[in-house]
Amino acid sequence: MTEQRTDFADLVRHRRAELAVSLRKLADQSVDPDTSGRPVKFGWLSKLERGEPTEAPTPAVLRALAVGLSLPLRVLQEAAAAQYLEMQSFIWSQDRTTRVLAAHIEEMSEEERQQLADIAETFARRRAQRSGSGHGKSDD
């Protein structure tokens, strides 16, 4: 038996802690922008954070949590798909750093995204140079 994934629960728990809001406040401020409804229930959030079995979030819940947690909807969708559907997430790393990048990428200008891409390319080139040098050291 495989271990239960917690990608979505971890994301909600960690982001809520970053924002320093209670479960009740998160439920209250999570409003679905499409319907103006509040589909996020305190009890469901509480169970989610305690690691108890929960139903997968509906699209309305995901949209509302995106508002309540101030995260892009895509980040929540990826985490929910990983946890509830066992899908491999391409923006989710073991140490959660890619979640941070993905969460802010949509806020960046085209120029800022290009700068970030250039940084990633620089790291990749340096890593390739080090592995090709045979002794693990680089001149940079």
Image: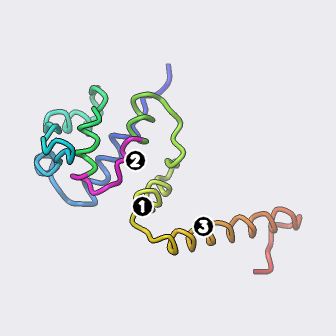
In the displayed structure, does residue 97 sit left or right of residue 64? right
In terms of secondary structure, where does tag 2 sit? helix
In terms of secondary structure, where does tag 1 sit? loop
Q: Assess whether residue 41 is covered by the magenta stretch.
A: no
Query: Looking at the picture, does residue 17 appear above or below residue 113?
Result: above
The residue to which callout 3 is attached is 117
For the residues bearing labels 2 and 1, Cβ distance under 8 angstroms? yes
* Residue closest to the eye, 128 or 91: 91
Q: Earlier in the sequence, mark 2 or mark 1?
A: 2
Q: Earlier in the sequence, mark 3 or mark 1?
A: 1
User: The C terminus appears in which quarter of the rendering?
Assistant: bottom right
Q: Identify which amino acid the numbered label 2 is placed on.
A: Arg
In the displayed structure, does residue 27 sit left or right of residue 79? left
Q: Residues within 10 Å of mark 2 (few under 14, many from 20)?
A: some
Q: Identify which amino acid the numbered label 3 is placed on.
A: Ala
* Residue closest to the eye, 114 or 134: 114
Disc number for residue 88: none
**Alpha carbon distance from label 2 to label 3:** 20 Å
**Alpha carbon distance from label 2 to label 1:** 10 Å
Q: Residues within 10 Å of mark 3 (few under 14, many from 20)?
A: few
Instruction: Tell me which segment is drawn in magenta.
Output: 67-77
Q: Position of residue 21 (x, y in %)?
A: 17, 56
Q: Identify which amino acid the numbered label 1 is placed on.
A: Glu
The residue to which callout 2 is attached is 74
Q: Residues within 10 Å of mark 1 (few under 14, many from 20)?
A: few
**Alpha carbon distance from label 3 to label 1:** 14 Å
The residue to which callout 1 is attached is 106
Q: Where is residue 138 in the image (x, y as percent from the top left)?
A: 79, 75
